Image (cartoon, rainbow, N blue to C red):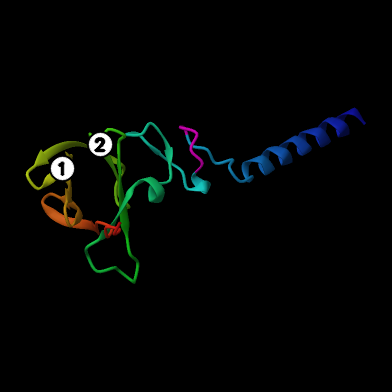
Amino acid sequence: MKKIFILSLCVFCAACAAHKESLPGADRDGHGCIASAGYTYVSVLDRCARLWEEGVRLNSVQAPANGALFSAFAVLSESGEEAELFLPEAEPVTLSRSFTPDGPYWTGGNYRLDRLPQGWRLYKEDVLIYAAPNPPQQAN
């Protein structure tokens, strides 16, 4: 009888542990970000964030393959001195800011992110790969 009770308790505990793994929000990563809620760790902010809420969406300038439109996101640090790129084809990349007469740009690795009066441009090895227009200005 004691063996049956212990065996039942073990099965119950295993079932509880399996159920806990499937609960919403139980998928925290090493930084505590909940991927199922759309959170990703952003190193330039040192916290979890939703890229589409806090970043700039950059759309591919190449024709979509099979109708799929790929986007990258750029998230700026609070000071604006760094930007972190989240690309569908690569690991996140951190860029450092510099200036030109046309405006600021961020570089790192093979990437250059420009912020121009007409919008954002992301280059890889001097080839434009993603872009986003600036939002229209609201009239006061």
Residue 128: x and y, percent?
16, 56
The dot on residue 80 is: 2
Residue furthest to the bottom in view is 66
Q: CA distance from mark 2 to mark 1?
A: 10 Å
Residue 36 part of the magenta segment: no
Secondary structure mostly seen in the magenta stretch? loop
Residue at label 1? 104
Above or below 43: residue 134: below
Of the residues under marks 2 and 1, which one precedes in the sequence? 2
Q: Which residues are magenta?
A: 30-34
For disc 1, the neighbor class at 10 Å (few under 14, some 14 to 19, many from 20) is: some
Task: Give whichever of 17, 125 is nearer the camera.
Answer: 125
Extreme residue toward the right, this view: 1
Local secondary structure at mark 1:
strand
Cβ–Cβ under 8 Å for marks 2 and 1: yes
Are there few (<14), some (14-19), or many (20+) residues within 10 Å of tag 2? Answer: few
Q: Position of residue 8 (x, y in %)?
A: 83, 36
- Identify the residue shown where x is 35% and y is 34%: 45
